[in-house]
Image (cartoon, rainbow, N blue to C red):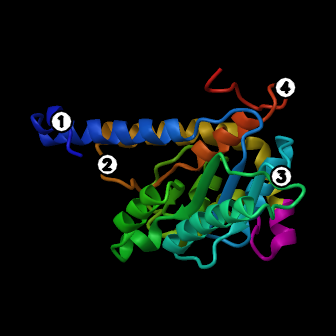
Amino acid sequence: MTDPHASALPWWQAREISLKRKAAEAFRAACAEPGDAFLIVTEGTVSEPVYFELLRKSLQLSTVTVKVIPGRASDPRHVVQTAADEVKALAHRVRRKRTAVDELDRFDHVWAVIDTDVAVRQGFWNDVVQKARDLNVNLAHSTPCFEFWLLLHLQKTTRADLVDGDAAKRIFREVFGRDYSTNRSVTEVAFAELLSLWPIAVRHARQVRQHHVSANTPPPPNPSTEADLLTCALNDAAQPHIRKIPCRYS
């Protein structure tokens, strides 16, 4: 719906209001409390699942309350659909009283961890966003890809050469100084070293987001990430003495 106040403003001010509103909506969607249940569906099959499993463990969240799975295909539309299908399947099991002993009866938060690179280049990014809204799935998206979120653990940057996923992966590998994606075991070792820096990455992600708001960058801004929103929601779901940063909603 068009904001009647925004429509009367110059286009650059209207765009800034729109960007701020979208950021506020995403922030509210990430509200979590201790004990909340999460479903996290990832586009990648190694890096993203390993990262969020390690984060879950570091925050002492159980596999009962945090379920991390890859999507059925790497297309972000399929990732969103996988998340919606998992929610529907759980509801079906609950109705038929066929849930497992260690299974909760609902997910309080449903997230898709996706890249924007291909969707933007091929012109279907707006379809991804609309599909997620229609299916009540939150997007933890990174532009051009998840490696930008990883890069923010090591430095704050809006460098212009992160033109696509391949470039972002190469640059992250160079800055990180080691391989991280040969196989799951290699990724687990590499990310165990990186993970302790996630509070720094959150700060950097917020600074990058503010940079794009100030610059009126069209969405999705390149480079940028909203993986920090999911990370903070998981932090908020942890017990107070386990959290790595203060809870945003206390």
Determine which residue is flagged by label 1. Answer: 6
Report the side of 138 relative to 40 (left or right). Answer: left
Which image quarter is the C terminus in? top right
- Location of residue 45 (image quadrant): bottom right
Proximity of marks 1 and 2: CB atoms separated by less than 8 Å: no
Q: Which residue is mark 4?
A: 241
Residue at 67% in and 57% down: 40
Q: Which span of residues is magenta-colored?
A: 178-189
**Earlier sequence position, callout 2 versus callout 3:** 3
Which residue is identified by label 2? 217
First along the sequence among labels 4 and 3: 3
Badge 2 marks a residue whose secondary structure is loop
Q: Residue 49 versus residue 99: which sits nearer the camera?
A: 99
Residue ID at (80%, 26%): 240
Would you name the residue on which mark 3 appears?
64
Amino acid at dot 2:
Thr
* Residue in the foreground of this view, choosing between 85 and 8: 85
